[in-house]
Image (spheres, rainbow, N blue to C red):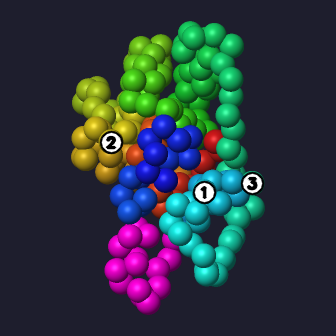
Amino acid sequence: GINKKSSYAFRECYGKLPEMHSLLSPVPFVALTATASKQVEGVIKKSLSMINYEYIGRYPDRNNIRYAVMKVKCKNVKENFKWLINELKEHGQKSTKYLVFCRNHKTVNKCYSTLLNALKEKAHINTEDGKRYFQTRLIAMFHSDTDQQVKDFVMKSFSCNDGIVRVIFATIAFGMGVDCKGLAT
């Protein structure tokens, strides 16, 4: 709903949809989600005043998609991602792809910066001119304030099996409707 303190809050403008729909009745509307749990779906239906509706649900059964919430043992980002740093150092552009969702920009920036510093020159693929660009990085960050040119590159690269970007630290700004090939987590 529109309560920003609610653990179920979604975009504020969505909470105004029932009012708009009442002005347009009997025009039907559709509500789609790819990420809501059954409990959150109930909250959404209630918030949107969905009383007489048809529910069509399809849950993907794909072995290459896994959702995991991990409690970290310490606040040391480098220590928590040591396994990922080692994989990127060892396999570079052949590493498995990982999408790491973070709660806010600050966490995205901290994780990204920590890995960038830990990987040093291994954070980039080699180029003919030896220079480093955002387009040569194995890791990326993605949030609402990320430059659009960077966002476009990251989405394109991450969506390709042979793309350069192997790890993205992102807020929920990433992912809606993006079809990423070869994604592990």
Question: Between tags 3 and 1, which lies in front?
Answer: 1
Height in image: 44 above or below 70? Answer: below
Residue that carries the numbered disc 2 in the rendered image: 144
- Closer to the camera in the image, 38 or 136: 38
Amino acid of disc 3: Asn
Residue that carries the numbered disc 3 in the rendered image: 63
Question: Between tags 2 and 3, which lies in front?
Answer: 2
Quarter of the picture holding the C terminus: top right
- Closer to the camera in the image, 173 or 36: 36
Mark 2 secondary-structure assignment: loop
Question: Between tags 1 and 2, which lies in front?
Answer: 1
- Give the magenta range: 17-31
Pointer 2 or 3: first along the chain = 3
Residue that carries the numbered disc 1 in the rendered image: 43
Q: Quadrant of residue 62?
A: bottom right
Measured Cα–Cα span from mark 2 to mark 3: 29 Å
Residue at position x 24%, y 46% in the image: 149
Mark 1 secondary-structure assignment: helix
Height in image: 43 above or below 112? Answer: below
